[in-house]
Image (cartoon, helix red, strand yellow):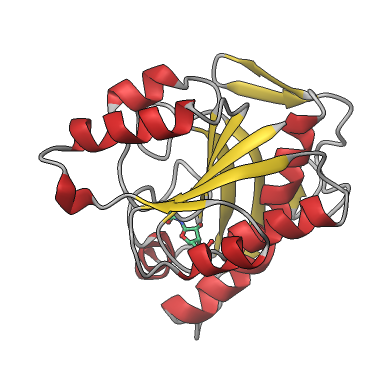
Amino acid sequence: MNIVVLISGRGSNLQAIIKGIEEGLIKARISLVISNKKSAKGLEIAKRHGIKTVFINPKEFLSREEYDSKLIEVISKENPDLIVLAGYMRILSSKFIDTFEGKIVNIHPSLIPSFQGLNAQKQAIEFGAKFSGCTVHFVTKELDNGPIIIQAVVPVLPDDTEETLSNRILQYEHRVYPQAIKWISEGRVQVEGRKVIVKDAKYGTIPVNPSLEDF
Ligand code: GAR
């Protein structure tokens, strides 16, 4: 399976996915990492692991559509089986999503459909939620709302700051994202409308459903 990863920042999810590949758990190859931010730390991580990188500067394009046309051009050359959004903080145009429909996955730091959009962890704290978590889902035109592959739950504690809750959630992000990509690479992920079934997975477990097998 050939993967293209889109990032905007730190790249810790990218790092977790690379680790899964290098340890032989995920049978895939990342052919390209793209960032919309020049200073994204994730670009350095990719380079250290011998992965090709490209920074595409939004300032060089007049509109989101033009920017995404460039993205489509660059990504299409890689002929990817999967496009992984790993902390990619730009909204994708309809044209982009139409072009790669069914092949784009994202991780969001909440239990969607709660707390979609920016600053999901802060939203959970301010709302007074007692649980939050993370979600790996397919990307559709509705922001942070596509079919859910896997979710992990963590408690929100009385003294949590955005940082402490984000870190607690992140520990699970690094497990559920490689797991979901492994399942996809094994052809075990079936989508029917809104519902995603992982073939032969164990369902009904807390705090990760379906249950982690490898990470
Ligand atoms: C992660 O917490 C990810 O869930 C979040 O950005 C962070 C990226 O961290 N993504 C979103 O909020 C997308 N809406 P990373 O660069 O270290 O992987």
Instruction: Say left or right for 106 vs 124.
Output: right
The quadrant of the rendering that contains the C terminus is bottom right
Residue 11 in the image, given as x and y percentages of width and height:
53, 64
- Number of marks: 0
Residue, far top:
192
Question: 10 above or below 83?
Answer: below
Q: Residue furthest left?
A: 62
Q: Position of residue 60 (x, y in %)?
A: 16, 48
Q: Is residue 212 above or below residue 166?
A: above
> What residue sits 41% from the left and 18% below the top?
99
In-front residue for pair 172/19: 19
56 vs 46, left or right, is left
Q: Position of residue 73 (x, y in %)?
A: 37, 28
**Residue toward you, 115 or 13:** 13
Give the residue displayed 58% in from the left and 63% down from the top. 47
The answer to which image quadrant residue 153 occupies is bottom right
Point 61% across, 42% down: residue: 31
Q: What residue sits 56% from the left and 25% below the top?
A: 79
Which of 73 and 94 lies nearest the eye of the viewer? 73
Quick check: 165 above or below 124? below
